[in-house]
Amino acid sequence: MSEQLSVRPAPLAASAVAARRSREWATVLALAMLAAALALVNLPYAPPTWFDEGSHLHVPKTLVRHGVYADISSEGFRYFGPTIGVGPTVMLPVAAAFKLGGVGLIQARLVIVAYLALALVALYVLARRLYGWQVATLAVLLALASRTLRFEGMAEYGRQVLGEVPGMALLLLGLLGYAAAILRPATARRSSLLAGLAFGLALVTKNQFVLIVLPALALLALLDRVYYRSGNWWVRLAPPVIAVACFGIWIVVMLTFFGPDGFAANLAKTRQAAGGAIFVFDPEASLRAARYLIQVYGGLLLPGLAYGLWRARARSPWALAHLAPTLMAVLWIGWFVTSLGWPRYAFPAVVLGAMPVALLAHDLFRALLARRRTTLAWLAAGYLALVMLVPLALTTRVVLNPRYAAHEMAAYLNRNVPQDVIVETWEPEMGVLTDHNYHYVPTELLDPAVRRAWLDGPPVRYDGLDTRPPYVLLGPFSAYTRIYPDDALARDYQVIYTAEPYTLLQRSAP
């Protein structure tokens, strides 16, 4: 009899495990369907293509059409700007998509959607390994709901050819390898090497990551050596060393490609960009950044990161693996508040912060239930649901309201404007939608123009209209920067077609 009683619980335990796995798989399937809908519906038209995306797409189009890894304008190739702003991990797959399917916005955006899928899978697997599937589910939902009332989040960035989502996909893979190296010592060498490679590719993808990832890895190695003592020297040294090597190889490739003079010019312009946007130390910009941060996740981002640091106080392998993404997010925020304050600069911190925020929500709910404060627990759960549902509704509205203006203007140009005449513009997205001979504002004016618009800086002088281009195409970025003098446009040009916010003007003066 006792023998029978001893074996009876086993089927019950097995059924409970099976039921839990079924719930997890059903949740994963629902998440995948939600992510697919947010990523694919109306993909070519929502969000509308814009300056940064168009600028990035010049490089793979130029590579496919001319065999040169560069930006292009009517006067020839340009080797600064998008050639170093986003790395070959984005440009080469997009070029391959152009080679296979022709040059087009949807082909390029599908590449980024693939990176978005990779980022979400890596986020889920990392959070599940550290916290369990319930926290992992919350983390993915929060990342998808990471937009605020005014600014885009992961779902929107994952539909545009920008470096943020690909960079995050590779960074999360690096963190996944780093966690495996710490939590599974038997695989430490292999996992550390893979982590370093993924971190290095993230640095190549988005060079701003160098500012945070390398210092974070160095700090993690120091903390492990003097406090946690959980990893070995492979864990401490391989990720930062390999990451630096990957970035160094990319620097050598650029030096070889551009030559010493071209590389020096690129470096000088990069320093100019750093002074204009990356390191600003402007009180108004810092205040703007702080206002953005307290809106993310309904105000839970900063408390979540604080809770994440508190949970990392234990001297254990888990605490060190948990600290890595949280520490990176904290360092990112520290840099963000000293920069120009663009929300895109905080995007990596927002995605990484989804995990400690989800952990905070999960632990708080369980603690309230354990203390029989059921009403408070469900009020907290309701607030979290609201925090996710409102941004998801805003993202859904973006997805379901496509904008066709750029495509309408492209169609008009293709019908009515010869491709060999010069069209003056600062709307680089049109260079992907048509094959016209565009002349773009010089890249070195970008940072002063943005600084003028964002920080009310000094006016920027541009003499592009002095060459009397036959056509001028205005759009959202030229309106934002006010780069073309209104008096010269009114005196010498007349409007021939409008597709808001784009306007095409033809020269009327002799």
Image: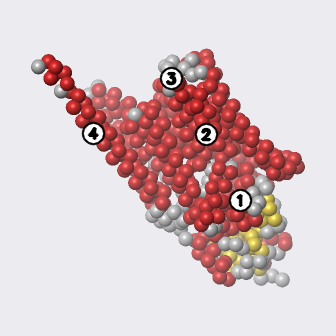
Q: Answer with mark 1 or mark 4, whichever residue precedes in sequence.
A: 4
Residue behind mark 2:
198
Q: Amino acid at mark 1?
A: Val
In space, the residues marked 3 and 2 are separated at their CA atoms by: 21 Å
Q: Give how far apart the Cα atoms at labels 1 and 4 are.
A: 50 Å
Viewer-side residue, 134 vs 499: 134
Quadrant for the C terminus in the image = bottom right
Q: Quadrant of residue 437?
A: bottom right
For marks 3 and 4, the one nearer the N-term is 4
Q: Would you say residue 360 is visible in this rendering?
A: no
Q: CA distance from mark 3 to mark 4?
A: 30 Å
Instruction: Indicate the amino acid at tag 4.
Output: Ala
Numbered label attached to residue 317: 3
* Picture layout, residue 265 above or below residue 332: below
Q: Are marks 3 and 1 in contact (CB under 8 Å)?
A: no
**Residue positioned 79% across, 69% down in the render:** 74
Q: Label 2 is placed on what type of residue?
A: Ala
Question: Looking at the picture, how far across and down is residue 352, in whole percent?
Answer: 53, 39
Residue 69 vertical placement versus 238 (above, below) = below
Residue sticking out furthest to the right: 261
